[in-house]
Image (cartoon, rainbow, N blue to C red):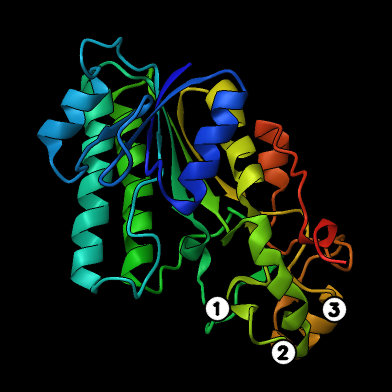
Amino acid sequence: MRIALTGSTGKLGTVVARELRAAGHDVTGLDVVGARGAGFVQVDLTDYGQVVDALGGVDRAAPFEAVVHLAAVPASGIRTDVATFHNNMASTFNVFWGAARTGIRRIVYASSETVLGLPFDVPPPYIPVDEEYAPRPESVYSIVKVLEEQLARELVRWHPDLSITALRFSNVMVPEDYADFPSYDADALARKWNLWGYIDARDGAQAIDRALRVAPVGFDNFIIAAADTVMSRPNDELIAEVFPGVEVHAGFAQNETLLSIDKARRLLGYDPQHSWRDCVG
């Protein structure tokens, strides 16, 4: 596919650009910063005029067939709450609206694990968590993610031929990050904020590629995490220490992710291939 990739110079976007190109896609990066060169266009996504112009094809290029939208202030606490809201909500509205207006009918974008209730100061309703309970945003960043999902639901209602897939990514990691992982075992609380989850950026790219290829029309959301936790300590020990009163659903292995990826496996064919355990001796 000919794909517009927003946030192409970010931590996840850089890997996604590389992996999608390796998978045979024609990828053009759209971001507010980046080096001039083939496959990159500088765009301020908060400016709708720039967005719709870019999505229609830059410098007489052919229009895009799909959009992968990753651009955002990537977490709480980086900018003020108001700045985060204004940047992220406007950017996503502009990208979704511009795609619909220019005839693009396939959108895959980065939602977030934060909609599940992170940092779980209020415990989750059950473990492992999944997509079946209502969002529990606990930050302005997460509120935007919830609003983006609702925006997508309404747009596909208006445009029945439109496909929008929200990927609720866990904490994105690259191999250089894994040297720190063994230190997490010393304190179960240090990473309890997302149930000890993570996602290798390469597997994040795989999930995007699968969604681009197989997601049907309409809207759906999927938790995207690694197959394992960041911990060497077993799950039953961690849960007993940190979330002793939470209902536990049976059937997970001692280091299996507690951010359920069953839905993504079943409907997208997502199959994570990378673990920090392969990189740390």
Which disc is residue 233 wearing? 3
Which comes before the other along the chain, label 2 or label 3?
A: 2
Residue depicted at x 42% and y 50%: 10
Disc 1 versus disc 3: distance between alpha carbons?
Answer: 19 Å
Which comes before the other along the chain, label 1 or label 3?
A: 1
Residue depicted at x 39% and y 60%: 74
For mark 2, what is the residue?
A: 187
Disc 2 versus disc 3: distance between alpha carbons?
Answer: 10 Å
Please name whichever residue, 164 or 69, is drawn nearer the observer in this view of the structure. 69
> Percent x, y for residue 139?
36, 73
For mark 1, what is the residue?
A: 120
Residue 94 visible from this viewpoint: yes
> Percent x, y for residue 227?
77, 54
Left or right: residue 48 versus residue 210 is left
Eye-nearest disc, 2 or 1? 2
> Percent x, y for residue 27?
44, 25
* Label 2 element class: loop
* Label 1 element class: loop
